[in-house]
Image (cartoon, rainbow, N blue to C red):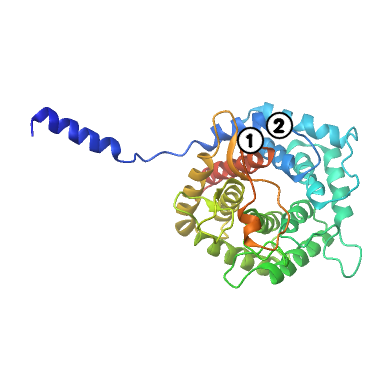
Amino acid sequence: MRPFVAFIAVLTLLTRVPVAQTPAEPLAIARILAAKYPAQPIMSYIPALSWSSSIRLSMLTKEPQWREKAGKDIRALVSGQTPAMAEPYRLTSMAGALAFADAASMNDDAAAGALAQKVAAFILPQKPDEVIRFATGWTDDMFMASAVLSRVDNGAHAAAVGKLLTSYAEKLQRPDGLFIHAVDGPHAWGRGNGFALLGLTEALTYLPGNWADRPRVLEIYRKHTKALAAHQSDDGSWRQVVDEPASYRELTVTSMIVASLARGVTRGWIDHATFDPIINRGWAAVAARVNADGTVKNVCSGTGAGPTKEYYLNRPEVNGADDRGGAMALLAAIEIESMRRAPR
């Protein structure tokens, strides 16, 4: 073979070899997402995650605009201009108060803190047979209620969170560690597993070290993380149905798991050696699904409980601007940055 021809052949082979991609820096992605979301500043867990993460972004970067943008949105709810508590009452709406609690603790907003306390008291059980008010019985409840009650704990809140998380785990956590979405939705829906894990994570984060249910909740968390690690896909993501290899790779479950694992290794609940590679692959999968304009890819649309696996497999994907996907990816970016800054 002539030297020049040989050179071209080698060059062709080299160009076919995949080049390792360095995942986008979390702060760069966080800034893109914080600037774009939420597009709809309503009373809901979705914008609340963006607001909370934006406040944290300001703390990490010393850039006030993110905190100010979130504060402006929150002010309409805190002032009563937009009602924060209105019928029909739903936990998905009440969970918006998590951002009020964070605005109080991180942004020195006393009025927001008072509203968070009011919402927390409103969702506490009022009957002996209630675990939490406005419950659906879905894993979603584990996050929606825990995220608020854990942040504004006064003792009664901690007991309610413990009962919620442990009773739901008894019904919905399978022997292998994954969660089904609901008794009448007996499949390992991706975001449903994300809600379960993030709900456990929030309780372990905000409730005190002597919380009576901490050992049991930590056990549930560790069992769940071990199970999820076994189902990470080849590109680092998790799937729309976690244990179904034919299911599409989905952004929100991946973001919630990455965020929960990153906080877990930072706080010592799980070990770095085992989970750092899993987290890094997961973050690469999140970053790959965020475009330069803040639009996102592979986001499962809003989903209730369904009786068949096909119901979950056939839920539509959102590709474009999406408050839910943007909020979840922003949360993951903040947790990754925080993990990287934490001392080992």
* Residue closest to the eye, 231 or 162: 231
Amino acid type at circle 1 is: Leu
Image location (x, y in percent) of residue 198:
66, 54
Amino acid type at circle 2 is: Arg
**On the image, numbered disc 2 is attached to which residue?**
67
Residue at image position (40%, 39%) is 21
Q: Name the side, left or right, on which 202 lies relative to 152.
A: left
Image location (x, y in percent) of residue 321:
64, 34
Q: Relative to 112, does residue 154 appear above or below in the rendering?
A: below
Q: Residue furthest left?
A: 2
Image location (x, y in percent) of residue 268:
56, 58
Q: Relative to 276, does residue 334 appear above or below in the rendering?
A: above
Image location (x, y in percent) of residue 139:
71, 60
* Mark 2 to mark 1 CA distance (whole Å): 8 Å
Q: Quadrant of the N terminus?
A: top left
Q: How many marks?
A: 2
Question: Can I make out residue 324 in this image?
Answer: yes
Numbered disc 1: secondary structure:
helix
Q: Relative to 91, does residue 223 appear above or below in the rendering?
A: below
* Residue closest to the eye, 340 or 47: 47
Question: Marks 2 and 1: CB-CB under 8 Å?
Answer: yes
Residue at image position (54%, 54%) is 247
Residue at image position (68%, 42%) is 324
Question: Can I make out residue 212 in this image?
Answer: no
Q: Which mark, by number, is residue 57?
A: 1
Based on the displayed image, in which of its 4 quarters is residue 36 positioned?
Answer: top right
Point out the tag, 2 or 1, that comes first from the N-terminus: 1
Q: Relative to 230, does residue 29 appear above or below in the rendering?
A: above
